C-alpha cells in the first residue's frame, strides 16, 4: 500500500470527477439458464489501476473477467473500453490479454515462442518481436530457460511465462485469473510484490480475480468484494479493512468480532449501541444515520482490542469482561480467545513485544477487553 | 495370536521357486512375457519367411529347396530378389499399393479428424455413446462388412438405385471393380483406427489453450493450425500408421472390391503363393514389403524420440 503515502502524489483517480474511466461496465448481467452468475454490475476502472475482484468461489468474479476477455457475452449491459463498446468484438480483436488460472501455456512451444505468439499474430517486424520478447523474458528473469518447453519448467517459472505472455503486447487491460493460486504460500507472497512492480513499471491496467483476501489487499489499488453475482463494496484495501460496509465484507476481509445490538443514542460524529446479550455499551466515533432502537452491528478487529487483567479506567462503555479460553502463540503475535459470560467468544491479538516467559496472561484468567471508540465500526447490514 | 505364520512372508511359491532355479526373478519373468510372445509369434515366423526367400522353387512338399544341402553347405540364392527388381509387375504393385495406401490414409485423416474433433468437443455424457458407435462395426466380421459393400456398390446395388431414384443419374455407375471401390473399402474399414487415436489426443487437449490463442489475437482457423493440429500430432501420426500399414498389404479389399487392373502387392503376393505355388518368391515379396514399411517407421520414431528428448 505504498501508494497511500501522504507526501507523495496520491493515485486516486476514482475521487477525481474529471478523470475518465478506462473501463466502464454498465449494468452487466450474465445468466446461464436460470442461474444468474453476474447480476447488474456497474463499475469504473481507471488507467494504471490494479483492481481486484474478490469473492468466494462461485460469486461470479471469473465470469465477469471472461466477459471482459470476450469469452462470454453479457446477457445485458455494456462494456466500454476507452469509450468503445466491446459488444460483438471477438476475443482475438480485443486489446485485452488474460493470464489463465491454468496458465494455458502452449505445450509444443518453447518459452520464447509462447511469449512471442501474441506479437506474431499482429505481424510485427521480426526484429521488433525479438527485442520485445527479450525484454519480457528478462523482466520475468527467465533468460536461461528461454528455449525450454513448458513441461520442463517449475510451477513458478510457468507462472512467469504466462505473465510475460500476457503483458508483452502492452494490452489496454491485463486480466489475471487467480494468477498465484497454484503457487505455494511463500512463493505467492514473493510473487505478489513482483506482480506489483511489473504493473507499475509497465504502467498497465491490471484486473485480478482472486479469492485470497491477503493477495487482494497486498496488490490492489482498489478491491471490489463480490457475493452472489453482485458487488458488495468497492474500496481501497485500507478503507475496506477499516470501514467495511457490511458484516459480509468485515468477515471476508481479515478477522473480526461482531456484536449485535440496538442503537441507543448518537448524534453528529458519534453513535451508541447497546448489546443486551453481552450487557455492554459500545461507543463509536462515527455517525451512523440510524434511529434509536434500530438493529445494528459493531465490528471490532482483534488487534484493536486491549487485553488486561486489570479493569480499564472507564468501565461504562467499550469494555467487556471474560475468561481466557485459548491462547495461540504465533511467534510475532499471540491470539487470545476470550469467552464472555454470554458464551460468545471474542478474538483479540497482541504483538509479543516482550518474551513469552514474561507474558502475564494465562489460560482461564479473568481478563478485561477494552478498545477505543475509533475502533468500533457501526454496520447496518 | 500368531498361531499360524503369516502367509505372505512364507517361502516363495512353487512357480516362483521354479523361476528362481531358472535364474529369473518374478519381476523379470513378467517383463519377459511380451518379449517371449514376440519371439515365438513374430520373429521366428519372420526368420522362416526370410529363409524361404533365399530358396528355389521345387516340385516337392513343401515346394522349395532346402537352404542347406546334404553336407551342410549353404545353397541360398538371390534369384527371387533379382526377379523382383527385373520384373516391373512387382515394382508397379509396390508403388500402386503405396499410392493407394497413402491416398486412403490422407482421406481417412481428412474424414476422421472432424469426427474425432466433434466427439472430443461433444458434451461428456455423449462421448461414451459416440465412442461405442465408432467401435460398433468391429462386432461384425471384417470380411462380411467388405462383402456388404459389394451389395452397395454393384451396378444394381443400393447406391446406384438411390442415385437413380432421386434422378441424379439415369445409367448405373460402374463403381465396383474399380480403384474407387478399393478406396471406399479401405477408408471405411480403417476409419475407426484413425478416429480412435485422434479422439484420445483431442479429448486430452485443454480447451483453454484455444482461448489463450484467441486472447492473444489469433483467429479461430489459424489457432486450429497453430495449436490444435500440432498438439494432436501424436494422434495424427498414430492414426496414419494404423491406417497406412495394414492398407499397404491389404488383400481382401482389393480382391473383393477391386478390378483385375487394381494392382496391389497383397494380391500379387497371394497369387504367387497360392496360384503359382512359388513360395520362395512370395516370401521375397513379403520381406521387401516389411522392409519398405519398417525402415521408414523406425527412422520416424527415432526423429520423434529426438524431438521429445
Image (tube, rainbow, N blue to C red):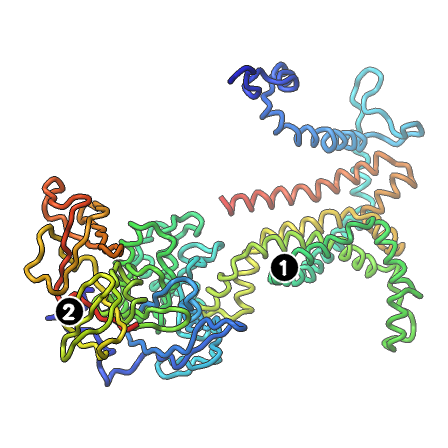
Q: Residue at x 81, y 36 (%)?
A: B283
- Using the rendered image of the protein, determine whether residue A166 is visible from the camera's viewpoint: yes
Give left or right: position of B70 versus A209.
right
The quadrant the N terminus of chain A occupies is bottom left
User: Can you tell which of label 1 and label 2 is closer to the viewer?
Assistant: 2
Work out whether A297 lies above or below B94: below
Work out whether B60 lies above or below A320: above
User: Residue B309 appears at what percent x and percent y?
Assistant: 49, 43
- Identify the subunit bearing mark 1: B
Work out whether A89 lies above or below B107: below
- Identify the subunit bearing mark 2: A
Q: Residue at x 23, y 52 (%)?
A: A339
On the same chain: label 1 and label 2?
no
Rendered image: mark on residue A283: 2
Q: Secondary structure at mark 1?
A: helix
Q: Nearer the viewer, residue A352 or B293?
A: A352
Q: Secondary structure at mark 2?
A: strand
User: Residue B252 appears at what percent x and percent y?
Assistant: 84, 49
User: Residue A120 appears at what percent x and percent y?
Assistant: 44, 67
For mark 1, what is the residue?
A: B125
Q: Nearer the viewer, residue A44 or A38?
A: A38
Give left or right: position of B304 versus A367.
right
Work out whether B34 lies above or below A287: above
User: Residue A145 appears at what percent x and percent y?
Assistant: 37, 50
Q: Nearer the viewer, residue B262 or B194?
A: B194
Q: Residues within 10 Å of mark 1 (few under 14, many from 20)?
A: few
Q: Residue at x 87, y 62 (%)?
A: B152
The quadrant the C terminus of chain A occupies is bottom left
Amino acid at each position: 500500500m505504498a501508494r497511500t503515502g501522504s507526501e507523495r502524489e496520491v493515485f486516486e483517480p476514482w475521487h477525481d470527477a474529471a478523470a475518465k474511466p478506462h473501463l466502464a461496465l454498465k449494468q452487466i448481467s450474465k445468466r446461464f439458464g436460470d442461474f444468474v452468475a453476474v447480476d447488474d454490475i456497474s463499475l469504473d476502472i481507471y488507467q494504471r489501476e490494479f483492481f481486484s475482484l474478490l469473492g468466494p468461489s462461485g460469486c461470479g468474479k471469473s465470469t465477469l473477467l471472461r466477459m471482459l476477455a470476450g469469452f462470454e457475452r453479457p446477457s445485458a449491459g455494456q462494456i466500454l473500453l476507452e469509450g468503445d463498446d466491446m459488444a460483438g468484438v471477438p476475443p482475438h480483436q480485443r486489446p485485452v490479454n488474460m493470464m489463465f488460472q491454468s496458465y494455458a501455456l502452449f505445450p509444443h512451444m518453447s518459452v520464447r515462442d509462447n511469449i512471442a505468439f501474441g506479437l506474431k499474430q499482429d505481424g510485427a517486424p521480426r526484429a521488433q518481436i525479438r527485442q520485445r520478447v527479450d525484454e519480457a523474458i528478462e523482466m520475468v528473469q527467465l533468460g536461461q530457460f528461454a528455449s525450454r518447453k513448458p513441461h520442463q519448467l517449475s510451477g513458478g517459472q510457468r507462472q512467469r511465462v504466462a505473465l510475460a505472455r500476457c503483458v508483452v503486447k502492452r494490452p489496454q487491460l491485463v486480466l489475471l485469473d487467480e494468477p498465484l493460486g497454484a503457487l505455494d504460500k511463500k512463493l505467492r507472497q514473493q510473487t505478489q510484490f513482483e506482480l506489483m512492480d511489473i504493473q507499475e513499471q509497465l504502467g498497465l491496467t491490471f484486473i485480478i480475480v482472486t479469492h485470497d483476501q491477503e493477495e487482494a489487499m497486498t496488490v490492489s489499488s482498489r478491491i471490489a468484494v463480490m457475493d452472489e453475482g453482485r458487488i458488495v463494496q468497492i474500496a481501497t484495501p485500507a478503507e475496506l479493512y477499516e470501514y467495511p460496509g457490511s458484516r459480509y465484507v468485515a468477515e471476508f476481509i481479515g478477522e473480526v468480532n461482531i456484536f449485535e445490538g440496538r442503537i441507543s443514542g448518537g448524534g453528529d460524529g458519534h453513535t451508541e449501541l447497546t448489546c443486551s446479550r453481552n450487557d455492554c455499551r459500545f461507543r463509536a466515533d462515527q455517525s451512523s444515520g440510524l434511529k434509536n432502537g434500530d438493529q445494528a452491528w459493531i465490528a471490532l478487529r482483534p488487534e484493536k482490542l486491549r487485553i488486561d487483567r486489570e479493569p480499564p479506567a472507564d468501565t461504562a462503555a467499550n469494555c467487556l469482561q471474560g475468561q481466557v479460553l485459548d491462547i495461540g502463540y504465533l511467534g510475532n503475535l499471540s491470539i487470545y480467545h476470550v469467552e464472555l459470560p454470554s458464551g460468545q467468544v471474542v478474538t483479540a491479538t497482541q504483538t509479543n513485544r516482550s518474551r513469552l516467559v514474561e507474558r502475564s496472561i494465562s489460560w482461564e484468567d479473568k481478563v478485561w477487553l477494552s478498545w477505543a471508540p475509533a475502533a468500533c465500526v457501526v454496520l447496518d447490514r | 495370536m500368531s498361531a499360524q505364520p503369516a502367509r505372505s512372508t512364507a517361502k516363495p511359491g512353487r512357480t516362483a521357486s521354479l523361476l528362481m532355479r531358472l535364474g529369473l526373478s518374478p519381476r523379470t519373468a513378467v517383463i519377459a512375457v511380451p518379449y517371449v510372445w514376440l519371439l515365438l509369434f513374430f520373429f521366428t515366423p519372420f526368420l522362416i519367411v526370410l529363409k524361404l526367400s533365399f530358396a528355389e522353387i521345387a516340385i516337392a512338399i513343401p515346394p522349395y529347396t532346402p537352404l542347406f544341402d546334404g553336407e551342410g553347405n549353404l545353397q541360398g540364392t538371390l534369384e527371387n530378389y533379382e526377379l523382383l527388381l527385373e520384373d516391373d509387375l512387382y515394382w508397379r504393385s509396390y508403388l500402386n499399393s503405396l499410392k493407394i495406401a497413402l491416398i486412403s490414409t490422407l482421406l481417412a485423416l481428412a474424414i476422421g479428424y472432424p469426427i474425432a474433433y466433434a466427439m472430443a468437443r461433444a458434451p461428456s455424457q455423449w462421448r461414451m455413446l459416440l465412442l461405442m458407435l465408432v467401435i460398433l462395426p468391429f462386432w461384425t466380421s471384417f470380411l462380411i462388412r467388405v462383402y456388404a459393400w459389394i451389395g452397395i456398390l454393384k451396378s444394381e446395388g443400393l447406391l446406384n438405385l438411390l442415385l437413380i431414384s432421386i434422378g441424379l443419374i439415369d445409367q448405373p455407375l460402374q463403381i465396383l471393380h474399380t480403384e474407387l471401390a478399393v478406396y471406399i473399402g479401405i477408408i471405411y474399414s480403417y476409419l475407426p483406427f484413425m478416429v480412435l487415436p485422434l479422439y484420445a489426443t483431442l479429448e486430452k487437449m485443454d480447451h483453454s489453450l484455444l482461448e489463450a490463442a484467441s486472447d492473444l489475437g489469433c483467429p479461430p482457423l489459424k489457432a486450429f493450425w497453430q495449436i490444435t493440429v500440432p498438439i494432436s500430432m501424436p494422434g495424427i501420426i498414430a492414426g496414419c500408421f494404423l491406417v497406412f500399414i495394414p492398407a499397404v498389404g491389404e488383400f481382401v479389399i482389393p480382391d473383393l472390391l477391386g478390378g483385375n487392373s487394381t494392382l496391389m502387392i497383397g494380391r500379387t503376393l497371394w497369387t504367387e503363393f497360392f496360384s503359382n505355388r512359388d513360395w520362395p518368391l512370395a516370401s521375397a515379396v513379403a520381406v521387401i514389403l516389411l522392409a519398405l514399411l519398417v525402415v521408414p517407421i523406425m527412422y520416424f520414431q527415432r526423429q520423434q524420440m529426438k524431438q521429445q528428448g
